[in-house]
Amino acid sequence: MSEDPKRVNFEGLKKEGTEIPDFGFDRKDQKIETVKSDIKKIDEAKENVSMPTEKTGEAQSLPVQQTSSEIKDIENILEEDLGEIYFKLTPEKQTEFKVKGEQTAKDISLLMQKTKVKAKKIIELIKDWLKVIPGINKFFLEQEAKIKADKILEFKKDN
């Protein structure tokens, strides 16, 4: 069996009297803890860095913490006039509809925190959420999305 020529045999060096470099670690545990602390520092630094935007490459600050009352208000606007449709869905679809609706409300809340709110993007988010309903009429979907987007934009003006 031939040994790999690139691999250093530290045992052989010890016997010959050659000094093995000391990297400042007495045990593997210390090395692991040092690596873990370095990773933690990197993660903390990442949280404080501004994120570049996709289109311009300019830095934008991290989103401000969303208030739960704002999200609840948006959820209330989204669920208006959909109670009957919701209760006709299967339990699996109800869960999917609810989860997708909550995520849509959070996404809309993030959009509304920007200086320039894009109504088209809000309408698209609402349409994607309403598409969870099986067999939904295309025109109903479009109409509901626009009505709800108008109400959400009106809510933003009032607040």
Image (spheres, rainbow, N blue to C red):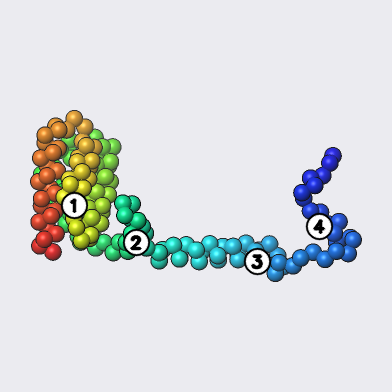
Residue matched to label 3? 30
Pointer 4 or 3: first along the chain: 4
Q: Quadrant of residue 20?
A: bottom right
Residue matched to label 1? 118
Kindly identify which numbered label has been placed on residue 10.
4
Left or right: where 107 falls relative to 77: right
Task: State whether residue 102 appears in this view.
Answer: no
Pointer 2 or 4: first along the chain: 4
Q: Distance from label 1 to label 3 (Cα)?
A: 52 Å
Pointer 1 or 2: first along the chain: 2
Mark 1 or 2, closer to the camera: 2
Vertical side of 77 occupied by 88: above or below: above
Name the residue located 12 percent from the left edge and 58 percent from the top edge.
Answer: 155
Mark 2 or 4, closer to the camera: 2
Kindly identify which numbered label has been placed on residue 59.
2
Pointers 4 and 3 in contact (CB under 8 A)? no
Q: Distance from label 3 to label 2 (Cα)?
A: 38 Å
Residue 56 x %, y %:
31, 54
Mark 4 or 3, closer to the camera: 4
Pointer 1 or 3: first along the chain: 3
Pointer 3 or 2: first along the chain: 3
Q: Mark 4 is on which residue type?
A: Phe
